Image (cartoon, rainbow, N blue to C red):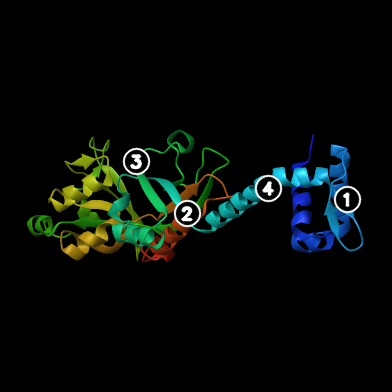
Amino acid sequence: MLDLNQMALFVQVVQAGSFAEAARRLAMPPTTLSRQVAQLEDALQARLLQRTTRKLTLTDAGRTLFDQCAAQIDALKNAASQLAGDNQTPKGNIRVAASAGFFEFFQMEWIAEFLDRYPGVQLEFVLADAMADFIGEGIDVAFRGSPELPDSSLVARKVASGYLALAASPAYLAARGTPRTVQDLAAHDCIRAVGQTAGPTLWRLNGPEGSTQIAVTGRFSANTGPAQKKAAIGGLGICLLPIGSLQPNFRAGELVEVLPGVASSVGNLYVVYPSRRHVPRAVTAFVEMTVQRLGPLIQPPFADVMPPG
């Protein structure tokens, strides 16, 4: 079987005009290059080059081979160079899996800036609270609250540490009063996750004085963060949600932070992608953007008293 690499080296020698010049361009010893061409001649059982001390001359067989394969070799080189160049410029589609409430704290302005910076990139988000199937759903990047990976080929990178804060609407607090201590929460309607309506729910909270827990009750529950937040805005009670998702509502005056400085245990956010090897440049750029944006946003205000996440 012919060695295509040897054929490519032969074309390089002819185009360079000498073994010495071709070796210089290829950064390889001239003797190695000469040996490779000689082996190609042996495989073809035909002399391709007439070698003299001053120049190289193509034989008829060499001219035929060069004319037939030089264009294809150059096309392959150009394709490889273009691919290498493309890999340096972020481009292509990125399919991202995240929780249903991802855009409660991840701002669309950041997405717009990223797409403006990389016009060759397209972003496609799959939002669900269930864990995504990387292979089955064609996921490139996923955001998760746990570093546990079902597949050893996956890689998890910690993006940020965050915390859950307490919040309620001004109308609710005006009607029911503002809690002054953690223990006061037991007398309030608290918005909880689905499945926690039968009996009290135990909220584990941390603050400047340390860690504590309180049994809370409420008449409204939902299975997503956005629904729980809408309930709090609607005056149905006090919610316990990621601080990043609540900050826009604090600024808008729709919600008020309850018991500032008291929050739930630290939660970590991880970005997961299929492999460390040959990660597309677009994926790398997107991951770096999320680390830059989210890292400073949701750091806990009292990390010295928060248990490790």
Local secondary structure at mark 3: loop
Spatial CA span between label 3 and label 1: 61 Å
36, 279: nearer the viewer = 36
Q: Circle 2 sits on which residue?
A: 282
Marks 3 and 1: which is nearer the front?
1
Asked whether the residues under the numbered discs 3 and 2 touch, taking CB atoms below 8 Å apart as contact, a structural biologist would say no
**Quadrant location, the C terminus:** bottom left
* Crowd rating for badge 2 (residues with CA inside 10 Å; few <14, some 14–19, many 20+): many
- Front tag of 2 and 1: 1
Vertical comparison of 244 with 127: above or below: below
Q: Residue 73 has which mark?
A: 4
Q: Does residue 308 appear in this view?
A: no
Identify which amino acid the numbered label 3 is placed on: Asp
Mark 2 secondary-structure assignment: helix
Label 4 and label 1: CA atoms lie apart by: 20 Å
Mark 3 or 1, nearer chain start: 1
Q: Residue furthest right?
A: 53
| Label 3 – label 4 distance at C-alpha | 50 Å
On-image quarter of the N terminus: top right
Residue under the image location 36 percent in, 64 percent down: 297
Q: Amino acid at mark 1?
A: Arg
- Residue placed most toward the observer, 69 or 300: 69
